[in-house]
Image (tube, rainbow, N blue to C red):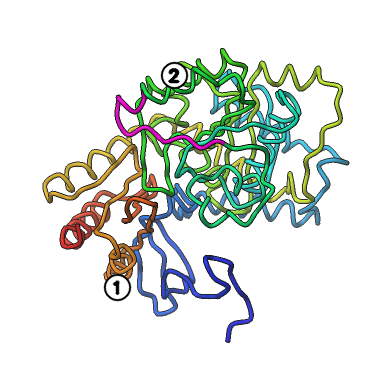
Amino acid sequence: MEHYALLNGSYTHETLYDLKPVRAEGAYLYSQENRKYLDLRSGLWNTSLGYDKELYQKVSDKFTQILENKLPYIDIHSFQHNSYEEVAQKLLAITGNAFKRVIYTNSGSESTELALKIAAYTNKKAAKNRILAFKNSYHGTFFGGVSVSGIDQGLNTLFYPKYGEVTFIDFPKNREDEERTLTALAKDAALYDVMVIEPVLASAGVYYTSEAFFNKLLKLLRENQVLTVFDEVATGFFKTGLPFFFNHLSEVPDLICLSKAINNGITPFGCVCVAEELDHRLQKSTSTKEHFSTQNGNLLGMVSAEVILDYYLKEKSSLENRVTWISETIRNIFDVQGVVYRTIGVMTSVRTASGYATQLVKELEKLGILVYLYINDDEEGLSIMPPLTIDEVSLEKALTMIGKKVVKYQ
């Protein structure tokens, strides 16, 4: 019996894969038996840049400097440190001029909590928070996350009372849905305080809608004094082709939640970026506001983020080109094979017949290919999000093998 447990559907230590990685290199994980597995799920699970030796060495050097000074931890609420400002400046450089302030967290789930608190502190219109979110969205497993994650509402029904009054709306799947959604929202949007938006439904199976819809939605919400939160924990850092999904838009959200690829998953780390107008409102507010955990601003998290953000800023054009190439490769191979899929940037879902997704994940594991899976109320399938640095031969070979397997189960 293992003496640790997970709460992952049940109380157990069982995992999706029968694999204990002992090292990694490039886009591959290696088992104790030195068998290599191509990691085509790393884009979803934090390591968007793969397992790059040079990057990890730079992070290791930074860690060594901190540990030699015996200072891996300081309390951000009591002390100052140069890293806090340096990392914030790099984050704001990559997010753009619309954002003016960064608040550090430890995860995407915590970022959701913080964003909801900020909305309550600055924009609460009635006795209870009134929140909008999309069905099948995912925003974490903390208290705020289970309140606004549409995909988990069946699981989370026992958690009451939840954070405010949450109204879930359908995520549009075509232009008619978009117009219907906007028309319906226009009637009562002014009743709400905040909308938490996952611009691409990653955990539900890579659903996305038009940029025009999001521009109209953000404009409508702003006109009705509704704060907008973009949860870019899954979509952030080039996975949809540009640094962030909101970069595709002319309208800008009030808050963005970030984590995962922010430091390539090296330590728990996240943040919320605050837009200029909301930053001004927070500065003017005289009410008491509170949010912290003891590890916010952990220095190992800070310096790992600094190294990764430097890479993103230096290689911005190259990474955008690589995402275009990966996306085109996925489309070309799956189109020829007749695979049913959805893709935006490097984010791809491959639908399977009901009851076969987990089986197919295990079959691909035996072939040395790691993918993830998604399940929603309507369908299930595979999630594929390769590292941005994957080599051409490995990607094309793996996609061809996946295509040959998956057409048998569609």
User: Picture coordinates of residue 235 (x, y %)?
Assistant: 46, 39
Q: Secondary structure at mark 2?
A: helix
Q: Secondary structure at mark 1?
A: helix
From mark 1 to mark 2, how far is it between C-alphas? 44 Å
Residue 29 to residue 282: above or below: below
Mark 2 residue crowding within 10 angstroms, few (<14) / some (14–19) / many (20+): some
The residue at the far top in this view is 223
Instruction: Name the one closer to the observer, 313 or 184.
Output: 184
Instruction: Name the quadrant containing residue 240.
Output: top left
Under mark 2, the amino acid is Asn
Relative side of 103 to 265, left or right: right
Residue 223 to residue 354: above or below: above
Residue displayed at 21% across by 42% down = 331
Residue displayed at 57% across by 44% down = 259
Under mark 1, the amino acid is Lys
Residue 44 to residue 274: above or below: below
Magenta-drawn segment = 167-178
Badge 1 is on which residue?
A: 366
User: Picture coordinates of residue 224 (x, y %)?
Assistant: 58, 15
Badge 2 is on which residue?
A: 215
Mark 1 residue crowding within 10 angstroms, few (<14) / some (14–19) / many (20+): few
Q: Quadrant of the N terminus?
A: bottom right
User: Picture coordinates of residue 290 (x, y %)?
Assistant: 81, 37
